[in-house]
Amino acid sequence: MKLRTAIVMAIIGVTNIMLSASTPEAQKVRDIITKVNNRWQAEHTPETWAFWDNAAYHTGNMEAYSLIGNPDWLEYSERWAEHNEWQGAKSRDKSAWVYDYGEDDNHVLFGDWQICFQTYADLYRILPDDKRIRRAKEVMEYQMSTPQSDYWWWADGLYMVMPVMTKLHNLTGDSRYLDKLYEYLLYADSIMLDDSGLYYRDAKYVYPKHTSVNGKKDFWARGDGWVLAGLAKVIKDLPADYEHRQFFIDKYKRLAKAVVDCQQPEGYWTRSLLDPEHAPGPETSGTAFFTYGLLWGINNGLLTDPEYTQAALKGWNYLSKTALQKDYTIGYVQPIGEKAIPGQVVDRKSVTNFGTGAFLLAACEYVRFLEKEVNADRKYWADFAYQLAYPILSNMANGTLSSNMSIEVSPNWDGRDKRVALMEAFGRLMAGIAPWLSLPDDDTPEGLMRRQLRELALKSYANAVDPSSPDYLLWSGEGQALVDAAYIAQSFTRGFDALWLPLDTVTKQRYIEKFKGLRSIDPPYTNWLLFSSMIESFLARIDADADIYRINSAIRKFQEWYVGDGWYADGPDFAFDYYSSYVIHPMYLETLSNMMQSGERTRIPYADYYRQALERSKRYSQILERMISPEGTFPVFGRSIPYRTGALQPLAMMAWQECLPEGMTPGQIRGALTNVMHNMFDDKENFNDSGFLTIGFAGRQPNVADWYTNNGSLYLTSLSLLPLGLPASHPFWTEAPLPTTSQKAWSGQPFPKDYRHADSPTRRDLF
C-alpha cells in the first residue's frame, strides 16, 4: 500500500503544479477566438470567390476549427469550397494558363488563386473525397511539369503556395512537390531576399532602386509576415528526413531574428519595417502573422531565446488590446495592397477577411503556448504512463523487482518458471514508453517525471544483464525469453539515442551476447518468427553480426501470411484476434526499418517491403479506429485480451510516426484513445496493492487469462502510449478531439467511406 500511496501522491503533486499555470488566460483566448470567428461568419456569407483574401481567412478558420472543433466552422469552409467547385481559377485551357498578376480564370498558375488548395487539402484530410483535391493536383502537377521556376515572384506567394506543396506531398507521396518547393524558393530568394534575412515585397522594391521616404530599405510588414507564417506552416509539414529541412529552418530563424529587431515598443510592427515614419502607426495583419510565426517557433522549440517570447507576448498584447475591438471585429488592418503607403488611413474600422484570418492564426498559436504544460489529455496519459512504469523501474533500478513484484498468474498456468514475468513486465513496458523517454529534457512537471524514469530505466537495463544483480533476468531455460527479449530490442529501436547509446560498453556487449544466445530457441511457426527478426534486425542496425537468414525468413513468411485488407494470419491459419496489433504490424515494420538503417544488402529490397508494409499498417489502423465505438470501447475478442489497450498499438504507432491515413486527424485519434483509456482504467481494479497490474481486461478479471498469462504480460498495454513520444506542441495533443468515424456515422454526420485495401504480396528478390 505504501508504494501505491506514494505514486498517487506524486501524481497529485504534479497535478497541482500543472493546474497552477495560466489556464484562465487560455480559456479567455479561446473565448475570444470563438466570438471573433462567430462574428465574422455571421456577417459574411461563405459563398464568395476563392481568391487570396478569402482563402487567407479560411486558413485561419481551419486553424481555429482544429483547435476548438466547432462543426459550424468546418461547414463554413466546406460551403466556400463547394461554392467554388473545389477550384481556384477555373480555366480548362492549359495553353491560356498564366502566373503574372491577374484576377480572371486564366490565372490558374498565379499563387493568389492557389492558396485555396491549402484549405481543400485540410478538408480532404478530414473527409477524403477525390473531388476535394482533384483540381489542386491537376494544377500543381501541370505547373511542376513546366521548366519554369519563377512562379513565386512576390513575397505573398510564399504563404499562398509553399504550404500547398507540403500538404499535397503528404497526401500523395509525390516527391516532386518537395523538389519544386525548394527550386521555386531558391528563385524567390534570388530576387527578393535581402542580406538581413528580410524579404522585399518583390523585385520592384529592392534597395537602392526603391527606398522609403527617408531613403531606407523598404520592407513591407505584411509581405514579410506572409513569409514568416508560410515558413512556419511548411516546416510543420516537412518530413523529418527531408534533405533540405535544415535550409528552411535556418531561413525561418534568420527571418525571425530580423523581425524581432524591428518591433515597435508598443508590440506592433509598422507597415515599413525599418522606417516607422514612412507609414506610422499600428498595423494588424503583419503583426498577426509575425506573432503567429514567432509563437509557432517558440512552441516547437526552434526559438529558444527569451527575446522571442518577449516579442511574441508584446505582439499578442497589441492584438488583444488594440486590434481586437469591443464588437469582436479585428481593426487596424491595412487594406489590400502591396506596399506601405504614406498617408493611408488605417484605424479601428479597417477590418478585412485576411486580417481576421491572421488574427485567428496568432490567437490559436497563443492558446497552444499557454496550454503546453496544462494539456489535460496529455497529463492523463503521462500520469498513467508513470503509474505503470514507476513500480517496475524504481524496483528494478535498485535490484528489488524480483523480491517486490506481486506476481499473478492465470488460473490455468502451465507451470513454467514464474520469473518470466519480470522480463515480460520490463521489456513490454519499455517498448511502450521508449518514445516518451526519448523526448528532450525540460523542467516541466512531466519533464521531471520523464527524466526520473529514464534514469531508472538505464539502471534497469544494466541490472537486467548483470549476473551479479538480484534482478538479472531469466535469459535461458524458457522459450518465453525470446519473446520478451524482442520487446527489449524493440525498446532500443524506438529509443535508440536515449536508451541504447547511453549504456556503458560492458552492458551493451552483454545485450549483444544475450540476444545472440537466444538463437538456440526454435520459434514456433507463428508471430514468434518476428521475435527473432526483431532481435536480429537490431543487431544488424548496430553492426553486431546479425543472422540474416532469421530476418529474411520472417519477412518472407509474413509476406506469404498476408491475408489482405490490412490483416495478417498468425501462421498458416487465420485466427480472429489482435495479434496483428500486439506483434505483427509493429515488429514487421520495425524489422524492415532496422534493416534499412543497417545498410545491409541482401536479396530482399527492404525499402520496397517497408513502403508496402506501411500502407498495410495504415489500412489496419483505419480498421482499428472504426472498431472504437461512439462510447469509447472496442470489441473484446480473441486470445490475450488482458493485454488491454495493446490491441490498439498500430493505431497509436501510426499517430506517433505521423502516418495517419486520410480521414483520421491527430486530435481525433487522441480523443478516441483517451476515451478508451478512461473506460478501461478509471475507477476499476487494474492495479494491485503493490502498484502492479492485475489480470483482466477492464479491472480484475482473472478468468479471461490464457495459460501463458501473468501480470507481467499485461504491460503490453503500454504499447498504446507511443504518441507520448510526440512533443506537447504536436497537433496530436493540441487539436480538438474531433469525432471518430463511429461517432460521425451514428450521429448522422458525413463520414469517410470505406474500401478494401488492395496490394500485391508478391515481391521479387534483388538477385
Image (cartoon, rainbow, N blue to C red):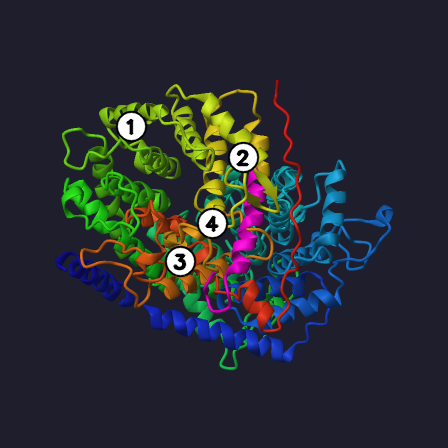
Dot 4 surroundings within 10 Å: few (below 14), some, or many (20 or more)? many
Magenta span: predominant SS is helix
Residue, disc 3: 311
Determine which quarter of the picture holds residue 331: bottom right
Residue 627 lies left or right of residue 680; in this view the side is: right
Numbered range of the magenta stretch: 613-634
Q: Which mark is residue 578?
A: 4
Q: How many marks?
A: 4
**Between disc 2 and disc 1, whose residue precedes?**
1
**Looking at the rendering, in which quadrant would you find the C terminus?**
top right
**Of marks 4 and 3, the one in the foreground:** 4
Residue, disc 2: 558
Circle 1 SS class: helix
Q: Is residue 30 above or below residue 402?
A: below
Spatial distance from mark 4 to mark 3, Cα to Cα? 51 Å
**Between disc 4 and disc 1, whose residue precedes?**
1
**Between disc 3 and disc 1, whose residue precedes?**
3
Residue shown at the point (22%, 58%) measured from the top left? 688
Q: Is residue 214 visible?
A: no
The spot of residue 697 in percent (x, y) is 36, 58
